[in-house]
Image (spheres, helix red, strand yellow):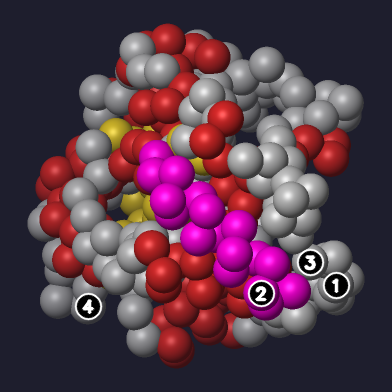
Amino acid sequence: MSNHLDVEVLESTTFAGKRFTRKQLSRIQVTVAEIQNLRNRELGHTICEHHGWLTPNRNNKIQSCLKALEQMEKIGLFTLPKKVATKKRPQKDIQWTEKTDKQPGVCCDLDNLMPVQIRKVIRKKEILLWNEYVDRYHYLKYRRPIGSHSRYFIVSGDSNETVLGCLLFSATPVYALTSRDQWIGWTEKDRSKHLNLILNNSRFLIFPWIDVPNLSSKVLSITSKQIANDWEMDHGYRPVLLETFVDPTKYKGTSYQAANWSCIGQTSGSQWNDKLKDQKVSKKDM
C-alpha cells in the first residue's frame, strides 16, 4: 500500500455521509488490496458486512458504500478493481389489456365514495395491474422504481371497493435541490446522512373516467397520515418529509396545495443526472 495515501494524513474521514475511523479505513485499504478479483459491487457487499453498514431493514447499504469507495479512490486511498461493463436490463414494454380498459364514468360527490382509502399493492398480480394502469394513463408512463418504494391503489369505500387510481412513493429524492435544502436548513453532511428520510411522490394518477371534486386532495391528505406507519412497517424506518415535482405547463398543483402541501420553489431546469447535466428540461414546481 506504499503507493497509496496514508490514512493518518487525512483531514476528514467522512465518505458518503458516513464517518470512518482511521483503523477502519486502513482495514478497507487491506481488503481492496487483497480481493482485487472481485467486482466493485461484490467488494462493496464485503465491506458493508465487515463494517455493519446496513439499511434500517438490515440490508447492505450498497449504493452508499460504492459511492464512498469511489470517493476514497479519488483522493488516493487505493485503486479499485477495473469496472466490468455490464449490459443494462432493458425494461420490457407493457402490453395493455382489457383489464385496464376505460370503465363507465364515475361522476358524483366525494361523500358517495367514502371512506376513500389507499391500499398497498403487494401481490405480484396486483403489481402487474398497477404497472399497466400507470403505463397506460399517466403522462410519464411506467418506469421501474429504483430503491425502496411503495405502490398503492386508491379505492372507494363502497362494497365493490372500486379502484380509482394509483400512487407511488420512493426513497430516491433528488440529491441536491437549492430551494428544498434552504427550506430544510441542513448542511451537505446532514443531507448525505438523512436524505432517505424524504419520500418522493413520483406517480399520482386518478383515472380519467373518475370525475369527483376534491378526490385528489382527499387522497393526498389520507396518504400524509398513513404512509409513515406503512413505510416503517415495510422498510424499517420512519420518513419525515414528502416531496413531489409538478410540471407547471401541465398542472397547477392545486390538489397538493389543497392538502396543505407547500410550494417552496422551482427546479433549475437542468438534468439531475450528471451524464446529462448540460441538457435542459422544463422547470418543475417543488
Instruction: Using the image as rendered, state which of residue 185 and residue 10 is in the foreground.
Output: 10
Q: For mark 4, what is the residue?
A: 160
The disc, 1 or 4, on the residue closer to the chain's N-terminal end is: 1
Across and down, in percent, residue 117 comes to 19, 59
Dot 2 falls on a residue whose secondary structure is helix
Q: Which residue is depicted at the point 28% across and 68% down?
A: 57
Q: Quadrant of residue 87?
A: bottom right
Mark 2 in CB contact with mark 1 (< 8 angstroms): no
Q: Pick whichever of labels 4 and 2 is earlier in the sequence.
A: 2
**Which badge, 2 or 1, comes first in the chain's sequence?**
2
Q: Which image quarter holds the N terminus?
A: bottom right
Horizontal relation, residue 34 to residue 46: left or right: right
Amino acid carrying label 4: it is Asn
Disc 1: which residue: 84
Mark 4 neighbour class, 10 Å CA radius: few under 14, some 14 to 19, many 20 or more: few
According to the picture, the residue beneath numbered tag 3 turns out to be 81
Residue 192 in the magenta stretch? The answer is no
Verify whether residue 22 appears in magenta. Answer: yes
Q: Which of the two discs, 4 and 2, sits closer to the camera?
A: 2
